[in-house]
Amino acid sequence: MVDKSVNSGRVATDPWDEVARRLGTDLYLDLQPDPTASPRGRGARRRHSLAEALRAAIDDGRLPAGTRLPPYRSLAADVGLARGTVASVYQELIAEGWLVARQGSGTHVADTVGRARTDAEPTRARAELPPPRHNFALGQPNSSLFPRADWIASTRRAITEAPDDAFAPGHPQGTARLRRSLASYLARARGVRAEPEQIVLTTSVMSALELLSRSIFGDILAVESHGLPFHRQVIERGGTSTVPVAIDTDGAVVDDLPDAVAGVLLTPSHQFPTGVSLSPPRRTAVIEWARSGGRLIVEDDYDGELRYDREPVGALQALGPDVVIYAGSVSKSLSPAVRVGWLVLPPQLVDTMVWAKGIREPDASIVDQLVLADLIDSGAYDRHIRRSRQYYRRRRDRITGRLARSGVRVPGIAAGLHAVIPLPADSESRVVADASRRGFALAPLSFFRHPACDVTDGGSADGRGLGGGVVVGFGTPAASAFAADVEALADLVGDYLPNRRLRAE
Amino acid sequence: MVDKSVNSGRVATDPWDEVARRLGTDLYLDLQPDPTASPRGRGARRRHSLAEALRAAIDDGRLPAGTRLPPYRSLAADVGLARGTVASVYQELIAEGWLVARQGSGTHVADTVGRARTDAEPTRARAELPPPRHNFALGQPNSSLFPRADWIASTRRAITEAPDDAFAPGHPQGTARLRRSLASYLARARGVRAEPEQIVLTTSVMSALELLSRSIFGDILAVESHGLPFHRQVIERGGTSTVPVAIDTDGAVVDDLPDAVAGVLLTPSHQFPTGVSLSPPRRTAVIEWARSGGRLIVEDDYDGELRYDREPVGALQALGPDVVIYAGSVSKSLSPAVRVGWLVLPPQLVDTMVWAKGIREPDASIVDQLVLADLIDSGAYDRHIRRSRQYYRRRRDRITGRLARSGVRVPGIAAGLHAVIPLPADSESRVVADASRRGFALAPLSFFRHPACDVTDGGSADGRGLGGGVVVGFGTPAASAFAADVEALADLVGDYLPNRRLRAE
């Protein structure tokens, strides 16, 4: 209970009138009932407003440390609240340390609060960069394609049908419901050989790589000479250093893989970013390399479903389920807003991985896992993939067709959400600077280059040379802007490549 | 295209009959159309089945390395598929490395596949422990309380109303939509002083602690002598070591905090696991300690909304928003299946934290973030909290009432989802072993003890001594089992505490 001594009347040293004046406006404003703003009852709302008004007044210095508060009966009468309500607000603020009740001298503002506020003003809304005029940012499906109606329908079914224990703490491996659906889906869509027991669900390929680095990779992992910098960063954060292996038109030059590495991270279906596919002989060779040396291959199948010219080439994993760790997510196929990814592991590695995740680290939303399982099992996911393929195929054709008219041939297979536009290595930085001035979001090929590559030769790891280029994400532009974006892109490239015909895939 | 030489007819060295025999059963089985299993068209399905049957036969050794396959025309006739379909299946398997086309001698199984399969049998369904008979596992809300209908309704609204760019890659800070809702919710429910710009969304308090350790904590962080071991582990994994500070009935003994630490991790509302609340004088003292030494306080408000005897005490953060990092999640209030948590940071730390998350690491599902924002703004979240409070209050009352009849007083405030049942330190391990035999899931108090504590005195950091005990999560038992579970618990405790009256809170 609040100290009864405060009820004995007003004390002249710091009269209530003065406190009321200091509190006044805020109390008046904050105590206005707002029936739409809160589901709480009106009384509870007004009680909260009083507490909040007092905290704010103390906090911003209107009621400085040591200020004596009026007796709760006076305050109750002044603000039209029940006496008990005001007494309980005092009690609450005493419990929180805002106020102290001193025996014999009433309730005062505590000494140590509200002092550092001026240093700690919250940052105001962060300055956001304006959106780029021509947004060819990478790694994004077109956000207008998200299958909203299907997601809502699957949520309704999945949440209605889930057993209660779906809402209990989940296993770090992820819900069995989605692992079953995925095992079947990955088998039919990508030829992956997976039992549900081999699948570990994560939030993304990136978080999966960090977990692998922390638990399974050794000291050194080979990576493609060009790849996602933040993938290399999380691998290195997990304690594994990376060395580059060259890429040519048949994909990673796996014959060059050094012996002294624990394994290699590859993008066999559609090398990121160069867009080539790992050739059949190299597929068998790299499996052999892994098996003969007790090594691992991590297959990042980041857009394996999005092949446009023919059926997708099956996953490398199916050739060597004993040595390949298959990694994927819905970030390209559905949306990066749904944070669900997966690893298909050689069976002997599953326990290590689950241990690395930790018993309390399911990471990926179980609710989303259940919804995704329903999306797959109902066929909606397959329909969405087919729709997406048609959509992106048209976009890729439009870009390659338009650039071909300017004499520029886009290398790489007809797949994915991005394309490389080749440039002489020495003009790359000028093109990118100019592109930025013209309002483009796009990335220079050198952005993806491993730091250990020889930059004097366009960044190849072996001297064969990839040349320069810019990488454009053609999933990103809004439908209404795409035609103009492609024209602007052709203009940009045309300004730097007069009559130049680039090497074929 | 597949090598034309394979079309010239059957070759005696490895006749088609033999291959057909080896393939036969699987082909027959797998090519059965299953209209319910797949949304794909029937032709595509049969094409896939053929490819899969061939892969499986190669993989498990029925078609050993070097085996010559029949011409695609023969196979097409035998299995009733179009010739072009079978040709494209061969082509696909060549691209994947399963088959090789040798000039002049047809299509063969490649040399390096299918060898290691016997070593790599997937682990069978993991042996799961049977569920405990009396499940007092910690840290779990009752999974039957999950507000399914509200979640579905909020999903419908949130997904329908979201702008397209909600499905584009998210900012690592989390969606502004939920940060706005949370800032307002945390202010009214917990007294937290937060602008949306100060909030960083995460998947859980645990992942938030790891991020903080990696970016903001210094070399040493003080932690309560008893707390979650996996919280200490992630902090240490991030590079910060921990030292314990004692707990008594007023919460952490903040006067004992050493100078040589960068800050302290506290559970002020309801100490985990002892259940005490940090006293008002200690609240102001710890803020003062942090301010005077340039230190930080991390407030883990893991169940701050679940106070049963009165309005919750407001967050410590409100007393010192310049020095307190406030952490919370929906894991106790809603379900650990929804992986959304938050940090409210002093403004000057926001950029560091966002940088630590990395530009591509939004972590928490944006879809769930949008749904949670709608759940909060629609009032459904508040209704759920009120329902939950009533539910858990009845459960806690039942446990404390029943144990009181056995002469056992449960210490700590009326709050949260767990209770400590005190025991003499020397009997704790016997009780826990016996509990395990009787089918209980519960945890010994010593499980939560910091390893640097003095175990000879019940694990206190300062010699004052907490004694022993078991910690029971009363949210977990199913409604149908709860009454019997409580009786069994009282029986268990009664067997070890004849007529013993424990010290009050």
Image (spheres, coloured by chain):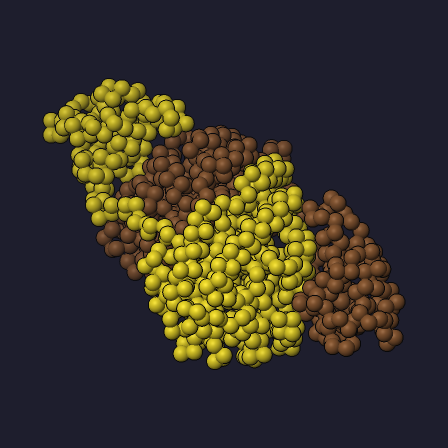
Chain colours: A brown, B yellow
Report the residue at 28% width, 35% height from top: B94
In the rendered view, would you say B40 is above or below B439?
above
Residue positioned 82% across, 68% down in the render = A70
Q: How many numbered callouts? A: 0
- Residue B451 quadrant: bottom left
Compared to B136, does B276 lie above or below?
below
Front-lying residue, B148 or A342 = B148
- Tell whether B480 sits left or right of B170: left
Please state, as top left, top right, bottom left or bottom right, where the N terminus of chain A lies in the image. bottom right
Q: Quadrant of the C terminus of chain A?
A: top left
Q: Nearer the viewer, residue A233 or B491?
A: B491
Residue B245 locus on image (x, y percent): 51, 75
**Residue A127 visible in the snapshot:** no
Q: Is residue A73 left or right of residue B428?
A: right
Where in the figure is residue B107, as x and y percent of width and height?
22, 31
Residue A487 falls left or right of residue B433: right
What residue is shown at x 67% (from left), y 67% (from top)?
A95
**A218 is higher (above) or lower (below) than A390:** below
Q: Is residue A161 at least partly visible in the picture?
A: yes
Residue B285, percent from left and from top: 64, 75
Farthest-out residue, left: B13
Q: Position of residue A39 (x, y in %)?
A: 69, 46
Residue plotted at (14% across, 28% down) = B18
